[in-house]
Amino acid sequence: MENTLEEFKIKIDHDHITNDVFGNLDVNLRIIKDNYDADIVQRQDEMIIRGSEASEAHEVVSELIRILESGNSLDPQTVNYVISLQQKGISYNGNNVNKDVICFTHRGKPIKPKTIGQAEYVKSIREADVVFGVGPAGTGKTYLAVAAAINAFKNKEVEKIILARPAVEAGERLGFLPGDLQEKVDPYLRPLYDALHEMLGRDNTLRLKERENIEVVPLAYMRGRTLDNSFIILDEAQNTTKEQMKMFLTRLGFGSKSVITGDITQIDLPKGKKSGLVHAIKVLEHVREIRFCFLRDNDVVRHSLVRKIINAYERHEHEHPEIDE
């Protein structure tokens, strides 16, 4: 039985819409054609979609046009994400993705969630005082948490931003690194500095650090403190011990909010040490006031290869669980 060919026409008001949907050197168009049996061409003021899967391709193109008409841009990662949602019967625009501006970078670029998972994560941060953001590399766990912290600080919801990381060695030992203690731990904190510099600018970040409105510290520096009116982020939480995680969670004071981020597939603790993040998920899962957001490979917003690398590792570990990595 032969496939029935369908044809859809979309009225295009501006040529740049077609150019943006097709992408630079037709990169977006190739992605759509790789996923659907459909040809897409422009004729005068119409985009014509024809093929056995023209209906599905029409849904995707319509979603992409609505993204552009709302003032947002397209890239191959967004196109792939819209296609993955369409194949699950989910609408990108219907879930209000990319419409919620968290804050602006120091250059004026809006920071927004780019996936449904990210949008739910940001919503949870706004609504709850303690949020766990768990997921693979590239899902925006730390970046979005820092953006939310800066937004809360600018809106005077908190007086201080505190960013912490466990200084766990993954190759070199701290004792062999050059410099004083601060210089030894700075490489572990670099991703947090990078996010701050992008959103606030280097000079403004330094000024706020000098005033102690921003602290970027190793997790060990948190012991014995009670933190009021603060936005506290614990990054790389999979590398905490159970004792460290309990210590961190009990630092929360009045008027404070805490976000804990981590990737339970990248634990660098010594053998025999249990991850405080894995333990906390089990212990706290029934505490209603705490939110757990589990980001997936679909939420990766780095290079499209990152998602494929994550999937390849997950498949390998599932198929060869006996191999000691």
Image (cartoon, grey):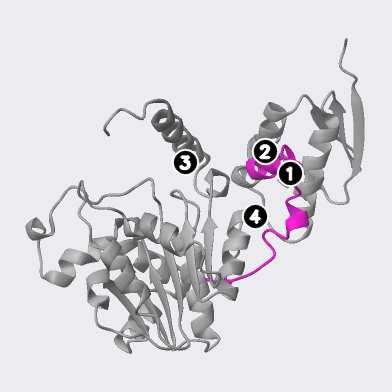
Q: Residues within 10 Å of mark 2 (few under 14, many from 20)?
A: many
Q: Which residue is mark 3?
A: 306
Q: Which mark is residue 28?
A: 2
Residue 106 in sight from this viewpoint = no
Q: Tell me if 2 is positioned left or right of 125 in this view.
A: right
Q: Quadrant of the C terminus?
A: top left
Magenta stretch? 79-108
Foreground: 1 or 153?
Answer: 1
Q: Position of residue 279 (x, y in %)?
A: 37, 57
**Marked residue nearer the N-terminal end (3 or 2):** 2
* Residue 261: % across, % down: 42, 61
| 173 in relation to 310, above or below | below
Circle 4 — which element? helix
Q: Could you tell me if the residues under marks 1 and 3 are in contact, i.e. CB atoms within 8 Å?
A: no
- Distance between the alpha carbons at the discs numbered 2 and 4: 21 Å
Q: Residue at x 33, y 59 (%)?
A: 276
* Amino acid type at image mark 1: Val
> Disc 4 residue type?
Ile
| Residue that mark 1 sits on | 21
Helix, strand or loop status at disc 2: helix
Closer to us: 314 or 108? 314
Q: Looking at numbered disc 2 in the image, what kind of residue is underneath it? A: Asn
Quadrant location of residue 1? top right
Task: Answer whether labels 1 and 2 touch (C-beta < 8 Å).
Answer: yes
Q: At 48% from the left edge and 60% from the top edge, which residue is drawn? A: 133
Q: Splitting the image into 4 quarters, where does residue 235 fall? A: bottom left
